[in-house]
Amino acid sequence: MNTPTSNYLQIAGREIHWMDWGGQGGPVVIAWHGLARTCRDMDELAMHFAERGFRVICPDTIGRGLSQWSPLPDDEYQQAFYARLAAGLCDALALERVHWIGTSMGGAIGTVCAGGLVEPRMKARIASLVLNDNAPQIADAAVERIRSYAGQPPAFDTVAELEAFFRTVYKPYGWLSDAQWRRLTETSTRRLPDGRVTPHYDPAMVRQFVVYPEDYVLWAHYDAIEAPVLCLRGVDSDLVLPETLTEMQRRGPGAAGRLQVIEVPGCGHAPALNVPAHLDPIEAFVRAAGT
């Protein structure tokens, strides 16, 4: 496996950071993180696929991690602009066919891309779509829970205190080793002017829920998807409700026989994608989808 590289691109006038894992010749996976997270959440998944001959592209969404914060938050923190960034990334890297694996918000962006209603050229690029605890509609109560901590990120005097916070708020991810918790913390920490530390994202990104209150109601996009879809749902998830899975089976890829659903024990929102029980079914699905 090649050593992963850290890279930056100008896309739609914004600097976007992304990690590149694996060789240039294999099939391509785009692994996109969740709402208040960074591309480094995907390290275990990227390593798993890179060791098996895939190239894995892991972007930081605008306003998260090392990507630029938007100077126009009410215009750019929304699904349509995220899909535009994804299309620009594929254009810049000359990616014609990709397997998309998205956690939470990353799954929503993948749904918009695979549906092709916003960025038509993306529809044919998506060879398969994995939704990690995401669906075309998410529970209102879960959205409010996420907004409550993401919109007003806490600040702490020490990194150890921030890690303790992450271990609490992200407990639904399931099992992580101590080293993984430490890496999650260190790769999603920024220091404030007063010296305290806080999560590494733009708090204004939650404006998406205010300015675009229907931005996570994606049934029209889901219905337009022609690629195979795998939905992983944490058994204890408060974001993806069982009745939503039933509706997914009834329409779009589900009605066409192209939807698989796997319930992941020991997790809520969202499985960390860091253990074989998470990664092996995803790999099997991606390989079955081909290119």
Image: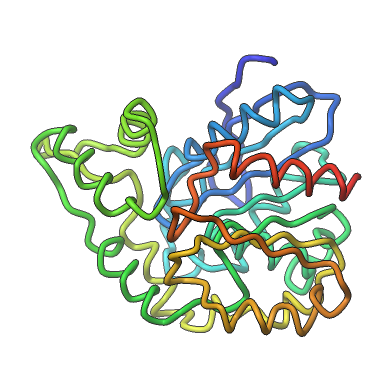
Q: Residue furthest front?
A: 265
Q: Which residue is at 51% across, 64% downward?
A: 76
Quadrant placement of the N terminus = top right
**As displayed, is residue 17 above or below residue 124?**
above
- The front one of 76 and 125 is 125
**As displayed, is residue 92 above or below residue 134?**
above
What is the basis of the colouring in this image? Answer: rainbow
Q: Which residue is at 52% across, 72% downward?
A: 240
Q: Which residue is at 33% across, 51% downward?
A: 170
**As displayed, is residue 164 above or below residue 124?**
above
Find residue 126 and report its horizontal and vertical position in percent: 81, 55
285 horizontally vs 205: left or right:
right
Q: Which residue is at 79% across, 75% downward?
A: 254
Quadrant placement of the C terminus = top right
Find residue 139 and report its horizontal and vertical position in percent: 46, 79
- The front one of 53 and 87 is 53
- The front one of 194 and 100 is 100
Q: Give the number of marks.
A: 0
166 horizontally vs 39: left or right:
left
Q: Residue furthest top?
A: 2
57 horizontally vs 160: left or right:
right
53 horizontally vs 168: left or right:
right
Find residue 241 and report its horizontal and vertical position in percent: 52, 77
Residue 106 in which image quadrant: bottom right
Find residue 101 and report its horizontal and vertical position in percent: 66, 50
